[in-house]
Image: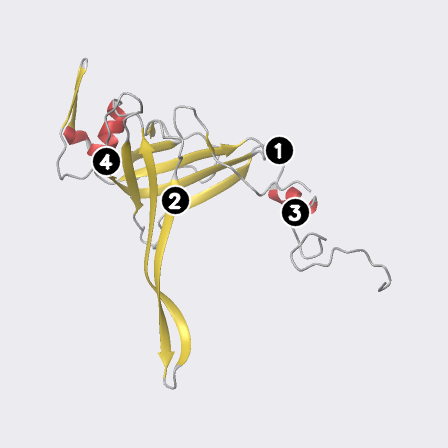
């Protein structure tokens, strides 16, 4: 059995798998179409990769007699975290600290560190898994990037920005979208038909008796 639905994530480009651009940019609704020209790479990401976090708070509603009637969601948020190593890249600096806080003149970059937050932008994560022939794209149409944590300046490790991108909800309450696409010519229906997924009839499916029938002996 080929476990083709177990996916790892490598950046599509060795220059980094995170991109950013102006809000309102039309991002392709798939995982393989080339991004618009206005999208730029956010820079090199540390080997820890990208961390997606979803937080939610749910409330129980009880009716007279102490019976739980339903559960409602009172809060939801989604964030993306990463450490960026491109600390001397003008595009990275402008995306992280805001274009008004970064001045580039010839061989000199001046970065003003203040309480100002970079403007809302769109962000994408571009990932691939060549082993399963799968591409993935995570799209945040409206994201707010902030910097937190320590920067340690030493000669034995790279300097990096620890950034968090909050995925702000759109008018429908959606924070981000994930696209998963096959790149090897197959389809997800092919996987299903060829046994790429466990189904209740498989001998290895949890709870299935995989021992041979010996007539009860």
Q: Nearer the viewer, mark 2 or mark 1?
A: 2
- Rounded to the nearest whole Å, what is the CA distance between mark 3 and mark 4? 46 Å
The quadrant of the picture occupied by the N terminus is top right
- Give the residue drawn at x 63%, y 45%: 189
Give the label on residue 150, or none.
4
Report which residue position mark 3 lands on: 192
- Rounded to the nearest whole Å, what is the CA distance between mark 3 and mark 1? 15 Å
Report which residue position mark 1 lands on: 185
Q: In the depicted view, which residue is nearer to us: 71 or 47?
A: 47
| Mark 4, secondary structure of its residue | loop
Report which residue position mark 2 lands on: 52
Mark 4 or mark 1: name the one nearer the start of the chain. 4
Q: In the depicted view, which residue is nearer to us: 204 or 165?
A: 204
| Mark 2, secondary structure of its residue | strand
| Mark 3, secondary structure of its residue | helix
Q: Nearer the viewer, mark 4 or mark 1?
A: 4
Q: How many marks?
A: 4
- Give the residue drawn at x 44%, y 40%: 29
- Rounded to the nearest whole Å, what is the CA distance between mark 2 and mark 4? 20 Å
- Rounded to the nearest whole Å, what is the CA distance between mark 3 and mark 2? 27 Å
Mark 3 or mark 1: name the one nearer the start of the chain. 1
């Amino acid at each position: 059995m080929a476990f083709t639905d177990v996916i790892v994530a490598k950046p599509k480009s060795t220059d980094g798998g995170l991109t950013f651009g102006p809000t309102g940019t039309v991002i392709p609704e798939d995982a393989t179409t080339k991004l618009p020209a206005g999208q730029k790479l956010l820079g090199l990401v540390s080997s820890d990769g990208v961390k997606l976090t979803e937080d939610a708070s749910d409330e129980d509603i009880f009716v007279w007699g102490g019976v739980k009637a339903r559960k409602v969601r009172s809060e939801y948020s989604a964030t993306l975290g990463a450490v960026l190593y491109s600390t001397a890249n003008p595009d990275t600096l402008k995306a992280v600290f805001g274009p008004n806080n970064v001045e580039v003149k010839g061989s000199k970059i001046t970065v003003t560190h203040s309480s100002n937050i970079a403007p809302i932008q769109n962000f994408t994560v571009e990932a691939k898994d060549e082993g399963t022939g799968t591409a993935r794209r995570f799209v945040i149409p409206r994201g707010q990037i902030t910097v937190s944590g320590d920067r340690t300046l030493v000669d034995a490790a790279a300097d990096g920005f620890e950034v968090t991108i909050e995925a702000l909800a759109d008018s429908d309450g959606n924070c981000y979208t994930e696209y998963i696409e096959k790149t090897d010519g197959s389809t997800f229906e092919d996987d299903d038909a060829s046994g790429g997924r466990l189904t209740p009839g498989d001998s290895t499916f949890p709870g299935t008796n995989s021992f041979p029938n010996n007539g009860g002996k």
